[in-house]
Amino acid sequence: MNRAPLDPAQHPAPGIRLGDTVHRATKRFFLGTHRLATPEETFGFIAPHLARCGITRLADVTGLDRVGIHTVLGHRPNSSTLSGSAGKGFSLVAATVSAAMEAIECFHAETLRSPYVDAAWNDLPPPARIPMERLPGVRNGAFRADLPEFWIWGWDLVRYRIVAAPWTCVGLHLPPGQVRARNFGTIDTNGLASGNHVLEAISSGLHEVIERDSVSCWRFASEALGIPIPRVDLSTIDSPVVRDLLGRFEEAGIRPLLFDVTTDMGVPTYMATVYDRDVRNTGMFRGYGSHLEPAVAMCRALTEAVQSRLVMIAGSRDDFFRRDMIRNQCGDNSAQVAAMEAQPATADGRCHANLSTPTFEGDIAVLVSALCRRGLDQVLVFDLMQPDIGIPVVRVMVPGLEAYRTDFYAPGPRASAFTAWLKARAAGTGAAVV
């Protein structure tokens, strides 16, 4: 059964220390998400800086589909990486803020100007190193501990000290003026987050890296053990907000499937898949969500799946190629749909407790504790905020977590450890996993 959020009087959070400063931030907005300010207040905060971040247009594309969940596209035509961003929300202004914030995050990662070190891993101070086995890598990566790399300093929330991470795991380009690159790590936006307050941004980044890890761990385990990812029985979901979303899907003729990809960390995480109920070869679309409040995690997964569908309808993804389009369009063929629908929905939508707190420092403390319990004892935060803009932007990195599954994904030790944990748990309950 779900329970109420933790009482701050019984579970006080002293604040989150970043360098010499302790930060605190109380939540004020709770419709489908947890925020410090309302969407209207947030838009007023970021609107003066849109042009500075290269954002020329925020386009409402909700009407291109029939689901009715607000979706907005952000355009940065002079971007050096992706020129399009997307956002979703329970109101038009919320979706607009979501799209704008994603674009603002990418701008900050593209124009990163932080100090860096050009050195071999062997030459870094031992307390400031990420263990070699936890360095993020890619398939056939070229990392060598005795060859120089570009490193950037981040703050460890666990041990309260600075730690060096590969520059390309934080920024979306090489350091200014540098041309040498070996790029042993994946360049992506995992853990890149913004907010009204630095703690709101850190909380968002932490939820995202846990979400990506959860999806990758479950997919690896599912393939290794030959078991399906647990499918949620939608009739067991009791959240009014989630039930409203499901009702919209039903009215629009869109079929939602929800899968519980919560791992041994215990942070509620879901994967949603949606497809057209009556027409084939229109695409299979996925969304993911992780949050200490299960209903928020479900909402994120479901609305992100709709956002993915609308982005494709609008033709605005500039990182999609012909093979991606064909693969997506064929993803909802009759055989694939039949196979997915044949899987029994055995997961209860009420099985995860609401672990959220009234403050962002409280949520961060819960998330860091969950990571540390699994032996993930470095939680790194990189401050990307630019003083002339003043919007909090961070990159969160947890060495040892699994990365997002791209074409170059290389499973790490945690994927294998989770698979072993899952197999042992099933053996203890008598359930068959192979």
Image (cartoon, helix red, strand yellow):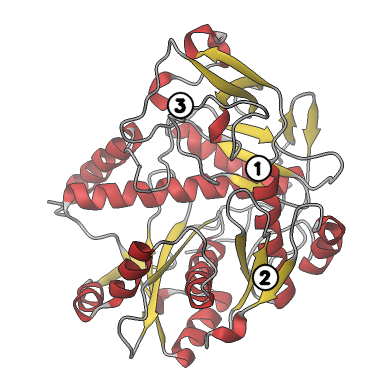
Residue position for label 2: 95
Residue position for label 3: 182
Mark 3 residue type:
Arg
* Distance of label 1 from label 2 (alpha carbons): 23 Å
Q: Residue at the spot x=18%, y=77% of the render?
A: 335
- The local crowd at label 2, few if under 14, some if 14 to 19, many if 20 or more residues have their Cα within 10 Å, is many
Nearer the N terminus, badge 2 or badge 3?
2
In this view, 145 is above or below 418? above
Q: In the rendering, at what x and y percent does residue 124 appear?
A: 55, 10
Q: Secondary structure at mark 1?
A: helix
Q: In the rendering, at what x and y percent does residue 266 appear?
A: 44, 48
* Distance of label 3 from label 1 (alpha carbons): 18 Å
Asked whether residue 210 is in view, the answer is: yes
Q: Residue at the spot x=71%, y=61% of the render?
A: 100
- The local crowd at label 3, few if under 14, some if 14 to 19, many if 20 or more residues have their Cα within 10 Å, is few
Q: Residue at the spot x=37%, y=79% of the render?
A: 275
Mark 1 residue type:
Glu
* Distance of label 2 from label 3 (alpha carbons): 37 Å
Q: Secondary structure at mark 3?
A: loop
Q: In the rendering, at what x and y percent does residue 218 appear?
A: 32, 51
In this view, 324 is above or below 343? above
In this view, 432 is above or below 395? below
Q: In the rendering, at what x and y percent does residue 44 appear?
A: 86, 63
- The local crowd at label 1, few if under 14, some if 14 to 19, many if 20 or more residues have their Cα within 10 Å, is some
Residue position for label 1: 110
Q: Secondary structure at mark 2?
A: helix
Q: Are marks 3 and 1 in contact (CB under 8 Å)?
A: no
Q: Residue at the spot x=84%, y=46% of the render?
A: 389
- Mark in the foreground, 1 or 2: 1
